[in-house]
Structures are given as structure tokens and as C-alpha cells.
Amino acid sequence: MKTEAKTKWNIDTTHSEITFRVKHLMISTVTGYFDNYEASVEASDNKFSDAQFEFTAQISSVNTKNKDRDEHLKSEDFFNAAMYPEMTFNSTSYNGDSIVGDLTIKEVTKSVKLGVEFNGVVVDPYGQTKAGFEFTGQLNRKNFGLSWNAVTDAGSIVVSDTVKLNLQLQFIKQ
């Protein structure tokens, strides 16, 4: 039986975005980003039926548009960027509607499932073949050792345990 060669697609960071959202004081939502990341996918066809995704984010690039909060997220209370500089994801299965993979944060690896919307493949005005995906889901941050929290005098939790993920990814065929 002949195995088809897989084509590699690399992330187009100019047209991609990695965001997370967390409830603050349980009354508002804070959005954060990772500014420095790499991702790729390998697949044997443009339908991505056998796709394998890989992703790495630099923890020091976390950005919530608030310098003090970003420094707190990088500290030992949360990500401990000095000791654990990267977060990684490697897919274990993909079926077009969802992706399952191993997410590693602070040397804790857990299987996570995300919804997927495959937006198709096009050739851009410069002749590059590109593919677009949207990944959405949520996780419990405490499962990855991100357990810092506080309670206000009124009894409100400062940071929700649930983190919502939204990845808008565009890949360039290599």
C-alpha cells in the first residue's frame, strides 16, 4: 500500500490570532493574546482529512493590554515564564469538526478537544495557497497548574477557572 506524502503548511502570523478570554470578578471578561507563536499542519490533501497540527506559544509574549496584569501572568502565580517558557499543542486526531490534542502548560499535559471550522483553501493575489481555520473551546486553567486566585471582600472570585479559547489561523502551503 502506497502512503501519500504529506504537505506542510506554516502559520501566516500576519493573518492569524490566538486569543483567550477569562471572566474577571465574574462581571466582565478580559481578553488576552499570545503575540509570539509558531504553528504548522501537515496533510496529504487540501481537504485536510488526515491533518496533524502543531502549535507552540512563547509564554513571555502573553498580552492582555495591561502591563501589570501581563507581568502577573508571567510570574510564578500563573505561567512561570522563566521556568516554563513555552506552551505546546500537538494534535492526536482531527475529523473536520473537532480536533483533539495534547496541550502542555508548565509541564502538565492534558488532552483537550476544540471545535473546528475549516474555512477553505484559496490562492492569494501573490500566488500563495492559503488555508483558514477557526478553533474554539474552553479549558479549566487549574488542570494545568494555573491555580492562583483571590476572593474580594464581597466574596467574588477574581479570576474564573474557565478559559475560553479562540484561534483564527491561516496557513501557507509550503
Image: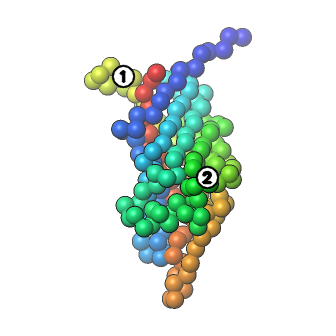
Label 2 belongs to which residue? Answer: 84
Asked which quadrant contains residue 50, the reply is: top right
Assign a secondary structure to mark 2: loop
Q: Label 2 sits on what residue type?
A: Tyr
**Left or right of 123: which side holds 113?**
right
Coordinates of residue 55 in the picture (x, y in percent) = 55, 40
Asked if the residue under mark 1 is in contact with the one under mark 2, i.e. CB atoms within 8 Å, the reply is no
Q: Looking at the image, how many numbered discs can be counted on the residues?
A: 2
**Left or right of 110: which side holds 6?**
left
Residue at image coords 66%, 14% = 3
Q: Residue furthest bottom?
A: 153
User: Which mark identifies residue 128?
Assistant: 1
Q: Label 1 sits on what residue type?
A: Gln
Residue at image coords 42%, 71% = 28
Q: Residues within 10 Å of mark 1 (few under 14, many from 20)?
A: few
Asked which quadrant contains residue 83, the reply is: bottom right
* Residue 83 versus residue 162 in the image, above or below: above
Q: Nearer the viewer, residue 60 or 131?
A: 60
Q: Nearer the viewer, residue 53 or 146?
A: 146
Asked which quadrant contains residue 27, the reply is: bottom left
* Residue 55 versus residue 166 in the image, above or below: above
Residue at image coords 59%, 64% = 76
Residue at image coords 45%, 66% = 69
Q: Tell me which label, 2 or 1, sits earlier in the chain.
A: 2
Image colouring: rainbow
Residue 119 visible to the viewer: no
Q: Residue furthest front?
A: 82
* Residue 89 versus residue 165 in the image, above or below: above
Coordinates of residue 33 in the picture (x, y in percent) = 43, 53
User: Which mark identifies residue 164?
Assistant: none
Alpha carbon distance from label 2 to label 1 = 35 Å
